[in-house]
Amino acid sequence: MKKIIPISALDALQSQTTNAPLPSVLNQPTGVLQDSRSRLLHDLRISVTDRCNFRCPYCMPKEIFTSDYNYLGQKELLSFEEITRLSQIFIAHGVKKIRLTGGEPLLRKGIENLVRMLSPLQTLEQTPIDLTLTTNGSLLKKKVQALKDSGLKRITVSLDGIDDVSFRKMNDVDFAVRDVLDSIEAAVQVGFESVKVNMVVKKGVNDHEILPMIKHFRNTGVIVRFIEYMDVGNTNGWQMNEVLPSRQVIEKIQNQYPLIPIDPDYPGEVAQRWKMSDGSGEIGVISSVTETFCHTCTRARISMEGKLFLCLFANQGYDLKALLRSNANDLAISNAIAQIWRSRNDRYSELRTEIQQGKIYHPKVEMSYIGG
C-alpha cells in the first residue's frame, strides 16, 4: 500500500489558497530560523521565469514543453518590486545567499534591473548579500556587462558538453557550444568574482566529456562542478542506471589530474570541493543521488509566480503572492514564512529508493518551474 509523504507547512497558505488567514500574534524575526530537523534557513532561490530557449531532456523535454505549453503571463509573475520585498523579509530570517534562476533567467526582460535592486541588500551582519545567477549562457554575452554593472558578483553557467555533438544532444535545440564558451570567457573578462560551470553528467550520454571539460577550463579561474543526473520533475524518464556516481567522477579525474579535497565555503554547501594539486584549478561534485544531503539542506525556493517551495522535489507550494497582493504587511508575511519553515521536514532524497519502488507516492513539481 502506498503512503503519502507528509508535507509540513502552514495549511492556510497552500498553493490554491488566495485568502490566507494571518497569524493572530506577530513576532519580529530573530535572524535564526530552524525547521523541524534543526536546519537553518540560509539560501533563497528565486525563479524569475518559467520559459527557456533550451530543451534539455532532463529538465524541459521538447515533447512536453512545446510552443503550445501553457506558460505564465506577465501579470502572473512576481514583479521586481515584489521579489525585492520578499528578499528583504527572508534576509531578516537569516538568508545570506540569493540565487536567481529560471527557466532561463536572462529571458526575463530587464533582469539587470532586478539585479540592481537586489545587489545593495545586506545581511543581518551588515555584509553584502551573496547574489548570484544561473544561466544556460545563450544570452549571457549580450547581457554580461549590464549584469556586472548592476552589481552581480558571481555567475554560474550550465554547460553539459564541451563539443557540439554532446552539447546539442543535451540542449536539444541545435545550439552551438562555441556561443556559450564565448559567454563564459566574457564573464571572466568583465571581472566577475566567481564564474562556475555546472555539468549534469548522464551516464552513457555525456560522461566522456568530463576530462575534456576540465582540460578546457584549467588555468582559467573557472570552477567546474559535476552534478549527478537527478530525478527532477515528472517528465525526464529518469533511471538509476543512468546516474554516474560522483565517486567515479572523482576517480576518473584523479587518474589524470591529482586532486586535494578542500573545505566547503559555508555549512550546508552541497558541492564537495577539490583543487588540483598543481594549482591549475578547482572542481566540485554534487552527489544529489548517491550521497544525500537532506540533513544539511538550507534552501528555500520561490517560483516565478510567488509560491514558496521547501525542496527541489516538493509537490506543494505556499502562495506568498496572495499575501503580497492582499495588503499584508511585512511582519505578517514574515510570520507566515516562519511558520512554514519551522514545520518543514522534507527529505526526498533520503526516501528516493522507497519512492522509486512505489512504496511511497510523491509527485514532484517540475524543475523548470522552481529552478535547479
Image: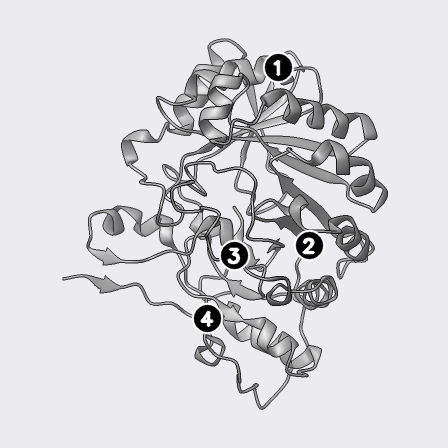
Chain-order first, disc 1 or disc 2 = 2
- Where does label 1 land, which residue? 216
Quote the CA–CA distance across marks 3 and 4. Answer: 31 Å
**Amino acid type of the residue that numbered disc 4 sits on in the rendered structure:** Ser
Location of residue 202 (image quadrant): top left
Q: Secondary structure at mark 4?
A: loop
Where is mark 3, residue-wise?
71
| View extreme (right): residue | 149
Lower sequence index among marks 1 and 4: 1
Q: Say few, some or many: other residues with alpha carbon within 10 Å of mark 3 (under 14 / 14 to 19 / 20 or more).
A: few
Q: Which residue is mark 4?
A: 343
Q: Secondary structure at mark 1?
A: helix
In percent of width and height, residue 314 lies at 42, 58
Type of residue at label 2?
Answer: Lys
The reply to whether discs 2 and 3 touch (Cβ–Cβ < 8 Å) is: no
Amino acid at the residue labelled 1: His
How far is the residue under mark 1 from the one under mark 4? 45 Å
Mark 1 vs mark 2, foreground winner is 1
Up the image or down, 364 lies above or below 306; here it is above
Element at label 2: loop
Category of crowding for the residue at label 4, using alpha-carbon neighbours closer than 10 angstroms: few (below 14), some (14–19), many (at least 20): some
Badge 1: residue crowd in 10 Å (few <14, some 14–19, many ≥20): few
